[in-house]
């Protein structure tokens, strides 16, 4: 059952379950997805504060009598009379009838009085609610608690925050030819790479998974791990075992386990084998074994699908225009995803082809940081041509 | 001692110490920085492998006698004679004198013989060393073990890898007005935000730090924590206490501790107070207290500085051209760093001003994902104008 990339995405997004909600300590909310709108609980600021270190005063005099000093978090004079001034540190409360704060570096003290230059009303005073009013929406449900939003939650004084529960994800790897890191090399074998593609890509998004191990290419072994995992996880991701080879049992096994196959190939290169199946609350994603095909499918299909499962409001890949800094080859009439290194050159994102686009090659991912999306009408591109890219 | 941004960067980069080297298990290398070139230890592949599931054969006949089957990681027939064929799964070794592999879906079996269409020599066979030859450089010293490189290290069979040691970083926060998350709000106070800016930004790069806590605005308290930390850390980062206010003791304290002040302000907005001082092996970075000023200085100066301290070969921020999707205001003759939300619109990175650029405002960072670099000649920009941006 080969489907178009559009159909495959439509199916994947339609089966992404709406996540449940839990409340967590704000300190644990990094990269979680908000399950509530974040409203500001009070005005920001909630009292008039000085924007500078300087003298709060009522303009109209040239010299003033300093009656005190205050700073952020300290209690100072509540009000002043005509020629009185209070020295206020940045962020400190301004006495309620003061009309301006003069920067300390613009003032001087003479004969015990402070000489203050002319100031306009409101100068260097941060007004109540000038940043946000109580009840304003600072962030909406479905937003990810990224680098910027995370400290904002603290700034807003949140102690706890409602977020979406994370799906339980289990992964396993198939293939008799797989060695683990640290094992002695055997000619013709390959080292387990796909588990570590998931580790790095998941770590980036702080997606969780449990690793059920490396399963040998036998129907019995695959069936056993499959039965166990179907009970335990919302999403099962496997690597390898879904092409046409005779030792590829995964397809057969889960067919007999009562899964409905939604599709088994999609029209992309590299990595057309991509199986999706469903049984009750469990989604199975069978990924191709070649690391380059695995990575491409992960970035193009599975990360957006998982984002939706995690509750992301915006989950589709962002496509960015880049300029080709080299030729990149692809077959017209086919949807090719080519690996590239994209860097700004004089500010313009410029893509250089990875040098090889063979499905069996992977080493270029040491440098590759983007995938070029070359649709059916595109064909090969030359230096200077424009292309669409998604960043890893 | 106010310096230009160029001078500040020059000073910071000149004091970034060259890190020492350690060897770690490859599983612990994510986001570490390579202290060695990574050479491929063998040819990739090191034997001829089938690119497809299909029949390995010597072209010239139309029907073949299947003498066996093999797959990746399995031992198959070493050679074949004239009209013999071996079914080889993707990634499996091809018998040494086979000249092509025909895709299984293009072949059929009739009367016990396999009918194979015409193939060209080498078809569907991955040649020895076609990806990389033994000794090729896959990644260079100073590269970060990012999402792509991390799995490549496994692919290359690395068990251990040499990386740069991480500097020991200690941070503390000053300010009497600071509340911690979960504490009850008090009018005029602010919640500790800067610690969590560091947490999220450091987590992204997997920089380490220890938090020495929140220190009250008293000379004695600041001096005590300072003496303790100078012994323990390579880099000390503080928040607050470096402007001109009378309660700002940090400057005074570390001056008497024997630190050489390299600069105390830089010509940028927001956040001109930024103090850098040095004593033996310890660098002190005094950051401004306003979260927006703290974030801006962190992204513009300190992350690149820390990248260099971590051994990054490429450590400066990447500047990207964006198109303004709204007006953004700034003063000509000054270097302003304006907050913006940058998203691709029809593939073109389009920047929308955060709505407020006041130093005392921070809530917009819930959405802000980029900083616009508006130099002295720029002045305000209108919709459609081009600007330089760095992403958070």
Image (cartoon, coloured by chain):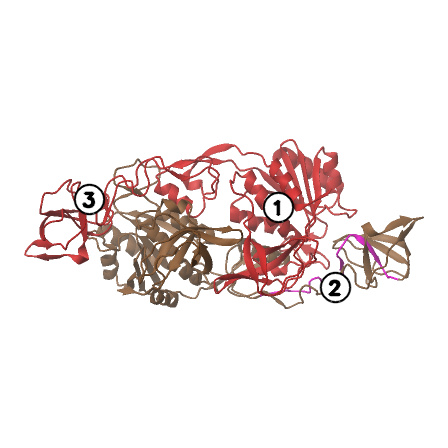
Chain colours: A red, B brown
- Indicate yes or no whether the magenta region holds residue B48: yes
- Quadrant in the picture for residue B266: bottom left
Please tell me which residue lies in front, A155 or B166: A155
For mark 2, name the chain.
B
**Alpha carbon distance from label 3 to label 2:** 77 Å
Q: Any mark on residue B253, and which?
A: none
Say few, some or many: other residues with alpha carbon within 10 Å of mark 3 (under 14 / 14 to 19 / 20 or more): many
Q: Position of residue B245 (x, y in %)?
A: 21, 53
Which residue ends up furthest to the right in the rendered image?
A: B111
**Alpha carbon distance from label 1 to label 3:** 55 Å
Instruction: Please give the residue where the numbered disc 2 appears in the rendered image.
Output: B127
Please tell me which residue lies in front, B269 or B124: B269
Q: Position of residue B217 (x, y in %)?
A: 24, 49
Check whether the beta carbons of the residues at disc 3 and disc 2 lie within 8 A of each other.
no
- Quadrant in the picture for residue B386: bottom left
Instruction: Please give the residue where the numbered disc 3 appears in the rendered image.
Output: A94
Q: Position of residue A2 (x, y in %)?
A: 72, 44
Question: What's the magenta region?
Answer: B38-59
Q: Report the side of A163 relative to A367 (left or right).
A: left
Q: Main secondary structure of the magenta part?
A: loop
Q: Are marks 1 and 2 on the same chain?
A: no
> Is residue B220 depicted above or below B81 in this figure?
above
For mark 1, name the chain.
A
Which residue ends up furthest to the left in the rendered image?
A: A111
Instruction: Please give the residue where the numbered disc 1 appears in the rendered image.
Output: A301
What is the secondary structure assignment of the residue under circle 3?
loop
For mark 3, name the chain.
A
Q: Residue shown at 27%/47% (left/top)?
A: B175
What is the secondary structure assignment of the residue under circle 2?
loop
Check whether the beta carbons of the residues at disc 1 and disc 2 lie within 8 A of each other.
no
Q: Report the side of A17 relative to B349 (left or right).
A: right
What is the secondary structure assignment of the residue under circle 1?
helix
């Amino acid at each position: 059952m080969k489907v178009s990339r559009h159909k495959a995405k439509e199916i994947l997004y339609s089966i992404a379950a709406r996540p449940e909600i839990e409340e967590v300590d704000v300190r644990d909310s990094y990269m979680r997805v908000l399950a509530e709108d974040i409203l500001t609980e009070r005005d920001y600021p909630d009292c008039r504060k000085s924007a500078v270190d300087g003298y709060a005063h009522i303009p109209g005099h040239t010299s003033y009598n300093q009656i005190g000093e205050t700073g952020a978090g300290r209690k100072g004079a509540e009000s002043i009379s005509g020629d009185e001034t209070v020295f206020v540190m940045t962020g400190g409360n301004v006495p309620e009838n003061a009309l301006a704060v003069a920067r300390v570096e613009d003032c001087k003290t003479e004969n015990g009085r402070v000489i203050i230059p002319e100031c306009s009303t409101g100068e260097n005073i941060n007004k109540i609610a000038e940043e946000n009013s109580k009840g304003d929406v600072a962030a909406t449900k479905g937003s990810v608690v990224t680098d910027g939003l995370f400290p904002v939650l603290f700034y807003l004084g949140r102690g706890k925050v409602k977020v979406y529960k994370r799906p339980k994800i289990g992964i396993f790897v198939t293939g008799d030819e797989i060695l683990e890191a640290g094992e002695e090399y055997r000619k013709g074998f390959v080292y387990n790479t796909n588990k570590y593609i998931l580790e790095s890509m998941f770590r980036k998004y702080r997606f969780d998974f449990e690793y059920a191990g490396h399963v040998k290419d036998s129907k019995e072994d695959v069936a056993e791990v499959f039965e166990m995992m179907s009970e335990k996880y919302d999403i099962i991701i496997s690597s390898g075992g879904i092409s046409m080879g005779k030792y590829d049992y995964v397809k057969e096994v889960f067919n007999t386990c009562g899964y409905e196959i939604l599709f088994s190939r999609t029209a992309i290169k590299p990595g057309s084998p991509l199986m999706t199946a469903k049984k009750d609350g469990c989604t199975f994603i069978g990924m191709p074994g070649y690391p380059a095909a695995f990575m491409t499918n992960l970035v193009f299909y599975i990360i957006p699908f998982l984002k939706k499962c995690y509750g992301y409001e915006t989950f589709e890949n962002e496509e960015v225009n880049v300029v080709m800094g080299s030729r990149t080859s692809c077959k017209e009439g086919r949807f090719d995803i080519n690996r590239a290194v994209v860097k700004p050159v004089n500010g313009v994102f410029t893509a250089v082809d990875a040098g090889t686009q063979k499905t069996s090659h992977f080493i270029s991912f040491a440098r590759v940081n983007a995938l070029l999306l070359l649709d059916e009408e595109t064909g090969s591109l030359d230096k200077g041509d424009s292309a669409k890219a998604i960043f890893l």
